[in-house]
């Protein structure tokens, strides 16, 4: 009986920790500048943080697999600020008015397993933050037409390229023709997913397609 009481007390304490205690913020104004930044060596893909840093790995897991709203909001605010800073000169000098932000779409398997697309959630939070209407947003134009394996489960770059080939389509090309597109993803690993999405958007008539991720 005593063992049962100990178990119940411990389990109740666990539930309190999970559901009621505030989660420590991973991204704060104090630690943002101290977290290692990504090395961006691709002219079309840009990342904010170095993925192998432990707090960033934790952040990505909370966003990608747990659907943690607080972590997603933190990352979305950082992404929004990063986007504004990165395209500020374009907005001012290059007729870069209201670029369209598009999340990388999820597979049916991903939606069935987790019930949400983490990239779409990030973009939805960015849309709420964007009070000045700097950006346009599109959620259903770029779609996943091939329910391929998760890129995280493929062994190497060649397998990733084969796995992701012909996975995307643009439903309404007239909506993006001659427009500037900003793709948003959570993690840039080999870039094969992003490059495949970029290819389809450019084929559909987009003027320029850049991609932004939280980590690389």
Image: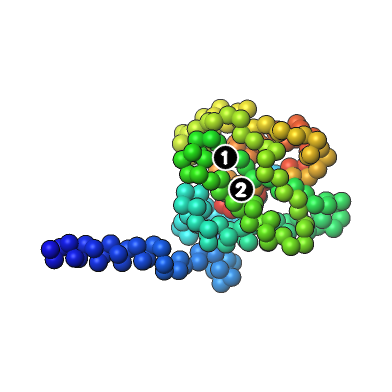
Q: Earlier in the sequence, mark 1 or mark 2?
A: 1
Residue sitting at x 77%, y 57%: 134
Which corner quadrant of the image does residue 196 belong to? top right
Badge 2 element: helix
Quarter the N terminus occupies: bottom left
Which corner quadrant of the image does residue 27 belong to? bottom right
Camera-side residue of 84 and 7: 7
Classify mark 2: residues with Cα within 10 Å, few (<14), some (14-19) or many (20+): many
Q: Which mark is residue 42?
A: none
Q: Where does the image place residue 20, in percent across and percent down from the top left?
A: 41, 67
Q: Where does the image place residue 192, in percent across and percent down from the top left?
A: 60, 36
Left or right of 185 in this view: 199: right
For the residues bearing labels 1 and 2, Cβ distance under 8 angstroms: yes
Q: Where does the image place residue 142, in percent across and percent down from the top left?
A: 68, 37
Camera-side residue of 16 and 151: 16
Scheme of colours in the image:
rainbow
Q: Does residue 140 appear anywhere in the picture? A: yes
Q: Which mark is residue 106?
A: 1
Badge 1 element: loop
Q: Which mark is residue 120?
A: 2
Disc 1 and disc 2: Cα gap in Å? 9 Å
Camera-side residue of 33 and 176: 176
Residue sitting at x 56%, y 68%: 28
Classify mark 1: residues with Cα within 10 Å, few (<14), some (14-19) or many (20+): some
- Location of residue 149 with respect to 2 vertically, above or below: above
């Amino acid at each position: 009986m005593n063992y049962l009481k100990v178990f119940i007390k411990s389990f109740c304490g666990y539930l309190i920790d999970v559901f009621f205690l505030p989660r420590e913020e991973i991204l704060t104004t104090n630690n943002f500048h101290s977290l290692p930044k990504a090395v961006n060596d691709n002219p079309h893909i840009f990342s904010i943080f170095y993925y192998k840093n432990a707090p960033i790995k934790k952040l990505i897991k909370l966003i990608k697999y747990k659907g943690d709203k607080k972590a997603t909001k933190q990352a979305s605010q950082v992404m929004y600020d990063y986007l504004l800073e990165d395209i500020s000169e374009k907005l001012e000098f290059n007729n870069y008015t209201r670029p369209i932000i598009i999340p990388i779409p999820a597979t049916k398997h991903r939606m069935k397993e987790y019930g949400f697309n983490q990239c779409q959630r990030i973009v939805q939070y960015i849309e709420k933050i964007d009070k000045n209407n700097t950006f346009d947003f599109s959620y259903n134009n770029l779609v996943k037409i091939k329910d391929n394996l998760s890129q995280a489960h493929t062994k190497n770059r060649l397998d990733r390229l084969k796995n992701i080939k012909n996975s995307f389509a643009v439903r309404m090309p007239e909506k993006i023709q001659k427009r500037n597109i900003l793709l948003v993803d959570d993690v840039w690993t080999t870039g094969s997913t992003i490059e495949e999405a970029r290819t389809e958007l450019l084929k559909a008539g987009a003027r320029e397609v850049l991609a932004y991720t939280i980590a690389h």
